[in-house]
Amino acid sequence: MGNFVIIGGSSGIGQGIASRLIDKGHIVVNMSRNPCNISGVKNIVFDVTTDEVNTESLPDVINGLVYCPGSIHLKGFKSIKEDQFLADLQINVFGAIKCIKACLPKIAKDGKGSILMFSTVAVQLGMPFHTSVAVSKGAIEGLVRSLAAELAPQIRVNALAPSLTDTPLASQLLSNEEKKERSANMHPLKRYGNSNDLANAATFLLTEESSWITGQIIGVDGGLSTLKV
Ligand SMILES: NC(=O)c1ccc[n+]([C@@H]2O[C@H](COP(=O)([O-])OP(=O)(O)OC[C@H]3O[C@@H](n4cnc5c(N)ncnc54)[C@H](OP(=O)(O)O)[C@@H]3O)[C@@H](O)[C@H]2O)c1
């Protein structure tokens, strides 16, 4: 069984990943501002925008690291402030870089490991009002591919690119029946995502089940990025 560190396992997709990994018998450490309420998870209070990663409180060997914090600020390009781009880069990109850099010596320790990040469908498919999130997640996609090349063969690096998924982060976009129906219908598979959809794929990419997969951005998006039906 392995040791997994989840940055942002207190809610949404990260919480789903924590639950899956615990069910499979792994050791899970969550780092976020609020605790993860899944039984068996070790919690460390951590704000990625202000705190340094204290690796002494993490397991000596980390088999998988997943970085979940992110943002969805949807606004027209004319009205969105440059500061918003910076804030989104901070949480989505520099936060991930900080955590990966700190944990890297422990991930490489037993010769193999896995790092997982999150992009969005809005990088592959241009959508209005998505410039800021697309800039940040586009950077994540570049980071994933170049880091995967640099860290092979010991460490695999991948990302999931979700479409709209029912989590606290997306609650404004699914706040009434009309929004829910419209959101479901825009996907070829006629529903929006849920945490389990993403947690299943994430657990696969984090564990040795995916030992021949690296440098990939995998769409978990109800077909939105590639299909027109
Ligand atoms: N949901 C969607 O529709 C959607 C679509 C495309 C991409 N994504 C991406 O998928 C990833 C997961 O999203 P989600 O929907 O599961 O989000 P979520 O429900 O908001 O969960 C985010 C997690 O990150 C933690 N977090 C946020 N800010 C933090 C900070 N400053 N320091 C430490 N931890 C922090 C939160 O914990 P605390 O608040 O307790 O700190 C929480 O555990 C994100 O990268 C997001 O951009 C989501």
Image (tube, rainbow, N blue to C red):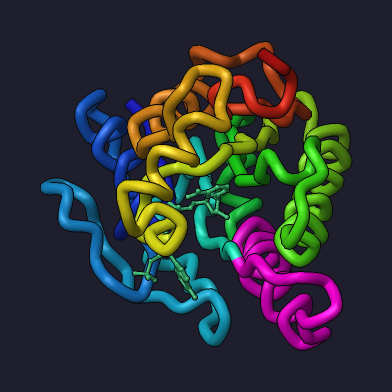
The stretch drawn in magenta includes residue 86 = yes
Left or right position of 188 against 229? left
Q: Residue at x 23, y 35 (%)?
A: 22
The stretch drawn in magenta includes residue 33 = no
Q: Residue at x 46, y 78 (%)?
A: 47
Left or right position of 26 against 91? left
Give the magenta part as a residue range.
73-101
Image vertical order of residue 211 relative to residue 29, above or below: above
Left or right position of 112 against 84? left
Q: Residue 59 location in percent, x, y?
A: 39, 52
Q: Residue at x 66, y 13 (%)?
A: 229
Residue 224 location, quadrant:
top right
Residue 154 shows up from this direction? no
Q: Nearer the viewer, residue 110 or 180?
A: 180
Residue 98 location, quadrant:
bottom right
Quarter of the image that includes the N terminus: top left
Q: Nearer the viewer, residue 94 or 186?
A: 186
* Residue at the farthest front position: 178
Q: Residue 33 location in percent, x, y?
A: 35, 75
Image vertical order of residue 99 relative to residue 51, above or below: above
Image vertical order of residue 97 relative to residue 196, above or below: below
Left or right position of 95 against 33? right
